[in-house]
Image: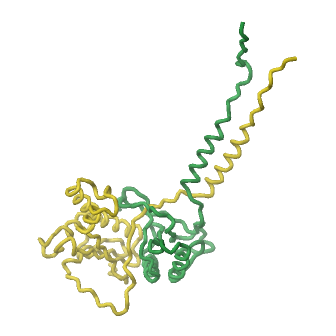
Amino acid sequence: MANFKKKDGLGSQNINTASLPDIVFMLLFFFMVVTKMKDNELLVSIAVPTATEVTTLENKQVVTYLYVGKPKNPDIFGTATRLQLNDAFKDPKAIPVWVEEEKKRLPQNMVPLFTVSIKADKEVKMGIMNEIKMGLREANALKIIYSTNKGLVKSRD
Amino acid sequence: MARKKRSLPEINAGSMADIAFLLLIFFLVTTSIDSDKGIPIKLPPKLEENSPPVDQNKRNVYEVLINSNNYLLVENNYMNLEDLCEATKKFITNNGVDPNLSESPDKAIVSLKNDRGTSYGVYIQIQNELKRAYNELRDDYAMEKFGRLYSELPKGTKAYEEVNTKYPQKISEAEPENAFNN
């Protein structure tokens, strides 16, 4: 008679873990593809406003970010709304210089597509935003995008 | 003694999972899924000192003012945020009917002015409503002429350009100064 191997049912059940790394690697690749390295640590706390008529940024290469909000460390930096360019607080007057530097990082043919994405907290007052816009116009960085979340705008009470 | 050849020991896959988890947590912690959506705007080029002021026919300019208390004043009348979209659409599609509103969508300009104390959140809501007015007009027109919504028209095609020419988005932002303080 053919040899019947006794089934190893009574021993400890070992879950085959060979596929576990596969699953984890898939998750890993998902995160690697979908996210990008945080290049600037946010020194200001920002809650972007919500809007319905938003368009998605397509070409992320030509985008650079500017952050406006209240500092996360009010003891060191105070409670007034500040502008953060790259990783330091700057005055809106420093924007033209900053724009020039950022434009240098782009290849020549992409310079006309240079876009500035403004991430500002909802509660920021327009005074500093107007100064920022003036600075951007001085620097001829005319394509801007106000960063918002997509959603229904809640009506003010 | 005949011995069955032992199968090659399998690589212990347990530690691979550990390594993979470590890498995963590393990426979770150091990266961010950025919200890269927003309202795109084209700023006007900086004002030259000697540029002559453009003479606008007042009826073609729709004044939208926001004061530091976030109140909306449209053509010298208080207005609620909800009504802004419809009112703007009426202004743009007037086509000369009402003498206080625009002559044609082509000439219609919305002039937005805010105060230093206006809240950015409210400013964005208003930009959103204005944009919505234009998008809705463009959607209707695109539906009529091409049977598709404006948002579905691929960029750069003749249809897209035509809808853009019919309802050009002319939102001008006035030079800021301390506007009326109520």
Q: Quadrant of residue B94?
A: bottom left
What is the image's colouring? by chain
Q: As displayed, is residue B156 above or below residue B29?
A: below
Q: Quadrant of the C terminus of chain A?
A: bottom left
Q: Position of residue A3 (x, y in %)?
A: 73, 11
Q: Measured from the top left, where is residue A97 in percent x and y? A: 54, 82
Quadrant of the frame with the N terminus of chain A: top right
Q: Which chain is yellow?
A: B
**Residue A134 placement: quadrant:** bottom left
The residue furthest right is B1
- B105 w.r.t. B147: above or below: below
Q: Who is closer to the viewer here, A136 or A26?
A: A26
Q: Of all residues shown, which one is farthest toward the front?
A: B2
Extreme residue toward the top, this view:
A1
Residue at the image position 38 percent from the left and 73 percent from the top: B42
Say whether residue A157 is visible: no
Residue B181, given in percent of the width and then of the height, sits at 34, 80
The residue under the point 75% across, 36% down is B12
In the rendered view, does B90 fall on the left or right side of B80? left
Residue plotted at (11% across, 71% down): B97
Residue A75, x across and y down, in percent: 62, 72
Query: Left of B109 or right of it: where is A85?
Result: right
Along the line of sight, the residue nearer the viewer: B91 or B159 = B159
In the image, residue B85 sits, relative to residue B74, either above or below, namely above
Q: Quadrant of residue B57?
A: bottom left
Residue B163 seen in the figure: yes
* Number of marks present in the image shown: 0
In the figure, the shade used to draw chain A is green
